[in-house]
Amino acid sequence: MRTVIGALLVLGLATLTAGPIRAQGKTAERLGTVRFVTSCAPAVQPQFDRAVALLHSFHLDAAVGAFTEVATADPACGMVHWGVAMAWLGNPLAAPPSARGLKEG
């Protein structure tokens, strides 16, 4: 019984701390700091780092969008394709990838 209650508490805390927070009508992201060095253009590095942070925070749809924006800004940035594939595959610890995720990834 204690294990179940503990698991529910952890899940509840994770739910409360996940995702964006709203303050004064604006959405503020709560993402960790990521520095993922690539050979992409230096101008897109901050965008790429944000996309990786979104990916690692399981904001998968937002990560796909962010990686796509980087690809538009720097078409030679091959790592964006890795990022999109990782986001489409989803969270392998939660469930196997969906059919769409396998196709798109």
Image (cartoon, rainbow, N blue to C red):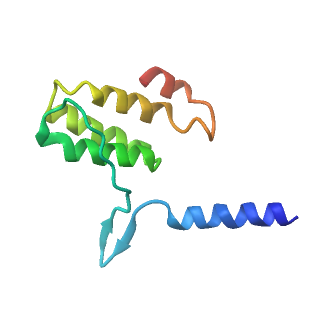
Q: From the image, which quarter does the N terminus lie in?
A: bottom right
The quadrant in which the C terminus is found is top left
Answer left or right for 61 relative to 72: right
Quarter occupied by residue 20: bottom left
In the displayed image of the protein, which residue is found farthest to the right? 1
Position of residue 73 measured from the top left corner of the image (x, y, whole percent)? 14, 35
Q: Nearer the viewer, residue 22 or 58?
A: 58
Task: Tell me: residue 77, above or below residue 4.
Answer: above
Query: Residue 74: horizontal and vertical position, in percent?
Result: 14, 31
Residue placed most toward the observer, 27 or 86: 86
Residue 90, image x, y percentages: 51, 36
Q: Would residue 83 be found to the left or right of residue 72 on screen?
A: right
**Res 5 → quadrant:** bottom right
Left or right: 5, with 25 as reference point: right
Vertical placement of residue 22 versus 88, above or below: below
The residue positioned 42% from the left and 24% from the top of the image is 104
Does 102 appear above or below 88?
above
The residue located at (21%, 37%) in the rendering is: 70
Q: Nearer the viewer, residue 65 or 49?
A: 49
Question: Residue sitting at 60 percent across and 67 percent down?
Answer: 13
